């Protein structure tokens, strides 16, 4: 019972950080996403979702690495995405096939999400990144719906997906308004 309560608390904290991340610039977005990942890792650990925990732990290092590149105003090298994707794939095979001896389809769904996050988060253009985030966020929501996650973990992914879609919609509306304004000025 105490593990369940702690898992809910950590996932609630993760939700607070992910909400905060959407009201900042790209540099701080990655920082708050990293703090969110820490909460999710702890929640997954307490719920015995070990592949999700290890995959996100690797994701934490990825987010922090990309955060430092972003902070310096530089693009993260593409080879880093391949390294983090390789580590994620290796963790799946080592943990699920060698240690736990399970190969749950849900974990493959989440594996797909984590690999997509690896390539998406290195993109510095926030608009492009938002479009590309739709796929990994959607598969993360599906993973949350069908696996052993806390309510707040699921809400974290749902919030991120909805916020991402709203940000895309807002950008499209602002773009149309600017074009209309430019057209009327001519």
Image (cartoon, helix red, strand yellow):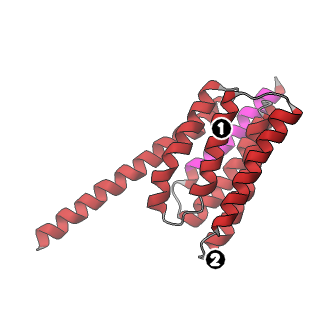
Q: Residues within 10 Å of mark 2 (few under 14, many from 20)?
A: few
Q: First in sequence: mark 2 or mark 1?
A: 2
Q: Which residue is mark 2?
A: 72
Q: Residue at x 49, y 52 (%)?
A: 132
C-alpha span from label 2 to label 1: 31 Å
User: Is residue 165 or residue 89 the one in the foreground?
Assistant: 89
- Is any atom of residue 17 visible in this view? no
* Horizontal relation, residue 136 to residue 88: left or right: left
The percent coordinates of residue 47 (x first, y second) are: 78, 30
Q: What range of the chain is rendered magenta?
A: 3-19
* Horizontal relation, residue 108 to residue 181: left or right: right
Where, by quadrant of the figure, is residue 181 drawn?
bottom left
Q: Which residue is mark 1?
A: 110
Q: Is residue 98 above or below residue 172?
A: above
Q: Secondary structure at mark 2?
A: loop
Q: Main secondary structure of the magenta part?
A: helix
The percent coordinates of residue 173 (x first, y second) are: 29, 54
* Residue at the limit of the structure toward the top, as seen here: 1
Q: In which quadrant will I find the C terminus?
A: bottom left
Q: In which quadrant will I find the N terminus?
A: top right
Q: Secondary structure at mark 1?
A: helix
Q: Residue at x 53, y 64 (%)?
A: 25
Asked whether 87 falls inside the magenta stretch, the response is no
* Horizontal relation, residue 46 to residue 154: left or right: right
The percent coordinates of residue 91 (x first, y second) are: 79, 44
Q: Is residue 124 above or below residue 17?
A: below
The percent coordinates of residue 139 (x first, y second) are: 56, 37
Mark 2 or mark 1: which is in front? 1
Q: Residue at x 64, y 54 (%)?
A: 118
**Residue 83 shows which numbered tag?**
none
């Amino acid at each position: 019972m105490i593990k369940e309560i702690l898992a809910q608390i950590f996932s609630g904290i993760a939700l607070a950080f992910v909400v905060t991340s959407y009201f900042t610039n790209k540099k701080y977005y990655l920082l708050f996403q990293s703090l969110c990942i820490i909460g999710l890792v702890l929640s997954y650990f307490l719920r015995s979702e070990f592949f999700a925990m290890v995959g996100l732990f690797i994701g934490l290092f990825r987010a922090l690495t990309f955060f430092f590149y972003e902070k310096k105003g530089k693009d993260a090298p593409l080879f880093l995405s391949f390294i983090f994707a390789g580590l994620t794939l290796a963790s799946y095979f080592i943990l699920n096939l060698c240690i736990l001896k399970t190969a749950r389809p849900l974990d493959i769904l989440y594996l797909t999400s984590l690999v997509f996050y690896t390539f998406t988060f290195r993109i510095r253009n926030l608009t492009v990144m938002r479009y590309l985030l739709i796929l990994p966020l959607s598969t993360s929501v599906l993973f949350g719906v069908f696996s052993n996650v806390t309510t707040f973990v699921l809400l974290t992914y749902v919030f991120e997906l909805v916020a991402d879609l709203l940000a895309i919609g807002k950008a499209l509306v602002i773009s149309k308004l600017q074009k209309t304004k430019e057209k009327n000025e001519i």
